[in-house]
Amino acid sequence: MKNLLTLISNPARPALTDNLASFYASKLDCVTAVSWLAEDIAVDIFFDGDLEGAKESLTPELRTENFDFGFQHANHRRKKLLVADMDSTIIQCECIDELADYAGLKEKISAITEAAMQGELDFEQALRERVALLAGMDSAVLETVYRERVKLMPGARALIKTINAGGANTVLVSGGFTYFTSKIAAVTGFQVNRGNILEIKDSQLTGRVLDPIVDSTTKLNSLIEFREKAALSPHEVMAVGDGANDIPMIREAGLGIAYHPKPAAAAAADIVIRHGDLTALLYLQGYSDAEFVME
């Protein structure tokens, strides 16, 4: 059982059947086992045929389906380090855009955010430009945004708590703000969190971000730092993100995941999740739903 194709559907809309699993198994050479991780949601197809050849030939057809898929080597599936983006990955929004909404600037700032995430603008320049527009905002708005706008991505808590229970390290590194990363780390279980620091004076945002800026290089360096600290091999590391500033860490990870991504991030990733929730990252590691830690 050298190689593996995993099919994963959204748990909220299960789309897999025994017939589908059998259909794709029939297209692989030397299938050795078909094993369900979660009924109608996730299934492993183990095979000893050519991995890259199978990936090349089946990917166009698999992309037309209403479920996700991932090809990988069967050995070393379970990772010992996860490095994750926050905004639009672990949570469902871009925090800076929600802050902008309270200033009546959401349309303007969201357009800059989108361009930065597409890789069309320099990240640091775009961040400083957007934060400058928030100068004078009451710092209490941060708590209001967290309470009213910030929602976890489905599967986020199960992902982090399950990986933690399995002995892995979990690191949240965001181009967003520490006010939010610290809270999200607390409710999900991330062991480390890093983000940008908003300058606040007299209970108001000054419109400045304190140095150093957390950007794509910081994300990459954080992955390398924690990988080396634990003396891990590249194949023991997973990274997940959705935007252009996640690309360096996605490429550096042994398994780079693009989650409901922008096109540039999708092109850089080993596996793209377009349909499922974050539990897809558990199924890709061979966790069954019975192994999930929910609380």
Image (cartoon, rainbow, N blue to C red):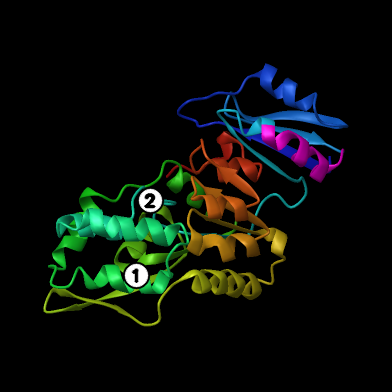
Residue at 88% in and 32% down: 30
Image x and y of residue 98, in percent: 24, 55
Image x and y of residue 67, in percent: 57, 31
Where the C terminus falls, by quadrant? top left
Amino acid beneath label 2: Ile
* Numbered range of the magenta stretch: 49-60
- Residue 100 lies within the magenta run: no
Q: Is residue 106 above or below residue 196?
A: above
Image x and y of residue 69, in percent: 64, 37
Q: Main secondary structure of the magenta part?
A: helix
Amino acid beneath label 1: Leu
Image quadrant in which you'd find residue 59? top right
Q: Is residue 199 above or below residue 80?
A: below
Mark yes or no: residue 9 visible. Answer: yes
- What is the crowding at mark 1: few (fewer than 14 residues within 10 Å), some, or many (at least 20)? many
> SS class of the residue under badge 1?
helix
Q: Find the distance from the CA under tag 1 to the CA under tag 2.
A: 19 Å
Mark yes or no: residue 166 visible. Answer: no
Image x and y of residue 204, in percent: 14, 73
Image quadrant in which you'd find residue 71? top right
Residue at 60% in and 52% down: 267
Q: Please identify the residue farthest to the front as the structure is shown.
A: 120
The answer to whether mark 1 and mark 2 are in CB contact below 8 A is no
Q: Write down the residue under mark 1.
A: 127
Q: Write down the residue under mark 2.
A: 91
Where the N terminus falls, by quadrant? top right
